Image (cartoon, grey):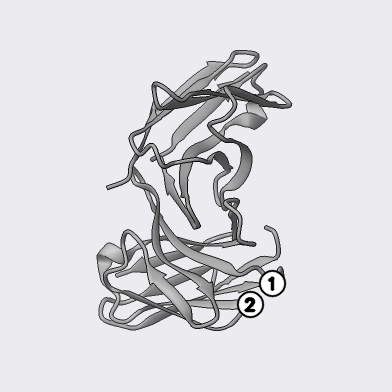
Amino acid sequence: DAGITQSPRHKVTETGTPVTLRCHQTENHRYMYWYRQDPGHGLRLIHYSYGVKDTDKGEVSDGYSVSRSKTEDFLLTLESATSSQTSVYFCAISPGQETQYFGPGTRLLVL
Amino acid sequence: QQQVKQSPQSLIVQKGGIPIINCAYENTAFDYFPWYQQFPGKGPALLIAIRPDVSEKKEGRFTISFNKSAKQFSLHIMDSQPGDSATYFCAANSGAGSYQLTFGKGTKLSVIP
């Protein structure tokens, strides 16, 4: 998975609790992305980063925040998880070209 | 909103057949069109990609055909094998310094022996 790890790989949480997902890369790539994957919707961009402390919103950013304090780490936070945020979350990295390399994913279930 | 429309949603072919997955787009600023392959429980992996200045690109048994005037592109898998059973996503990137990808909704391919 191109030097990308995601943690945790599986998580079950309750509605209203905060959740943080971590993406870690060893490739020193500048660009990092968070997507969610849901049946019938494909992959949808949540947030992305184009450098340390430089982030921007994607298509489905409501209810999510991100932070990138180091090149290698990109955190996705659900401030107050809802059942609609039950999904599989993928991190992707890119050296600054169009090609993106995806991590193994995190399965999140919000009860 | 930028969109990439992918069809069919699912596809079943016999081993050795040639499944074809189609995608259409509207935004003429798109200038990079990758295909990703995803196996169950795994992240998507880049399979093959094309730019609008060529009409066809082959890598092994995988071919992308691109029709710029129709704003359509398709993936063909020659001599399909059961190991090709996966979900395939097309995507597009709008260039001009934007490295965001817009994905189609995916096609689940099953190749039966």
Sort mark 2 into few (<14), some (14-19) or many (20+) by Cα contacts within 10 Å: some
Find residue A99 and report its horizontal and vertical position in percent: 60, 51
Find residue A20 and report its horizontal and vertical position in percent: 44, 80
Label at residue B59: none
Image quarter for residue B4?
Answer: top left
Which residue is at a point 50% across and 57% down the rendered structure image?
B97
Residue pointed to by mark 2: A72
| Residue furthest out toward the right | B60
SS type, badge 1 = loop
Which residue is at a point 73% across and 26% down the rendered structure image?
B60
Say which chain tag 2 marks: A
The residue lying toward the viewer, choosing from B33 and A75, is: B33
Image quarter for residue A94?
Answer: bottom right
Say which chain tag 1 marks: A
**Do the CB atoms of the residues marked 1 and 2 lie less than 8 Å apart?**
yes
Q: Is residue B10 left or right of residue A94?
A: left
Labels 1 and 2 within one chain: yes
The residue lying toward the viewer, choosing from B89 and B51, is: B51
Residue pointed to by mark 1: A28
Q: Tell me the amino acid under the disc marked 2.
A: Glu
Find residue A34 and report its horizontal and vertical position in percent: 46, 65
The Cα–Cα distance between marks 1 and 2, rounded to whole angstroms, is 6 Å
Q: Is residue A104 left or right of residue B102?
A: right
The residue lying toward the viewer, choosing from B107 and B85, is: B107
- Is residue A6 positioned above or below B32 on the image? below
Which residue is at a point 49% across and 83% down the rendered structure image?
A53
Find residue A66 and report its horizontal and vertical position in percent: 42, 78
First in sequence: mark 1 vs mark 2: 1
SS type, badge 2 = loop
Q: Tell me the amino acid under the disc marked 1.
A: Asn
Which residue is at a point 32% across and 45% down the rendered structure image?
B2
Sort mark 1 into few (<14), some (14-19) or many (20+) by Cα contacts within 10 Å: some
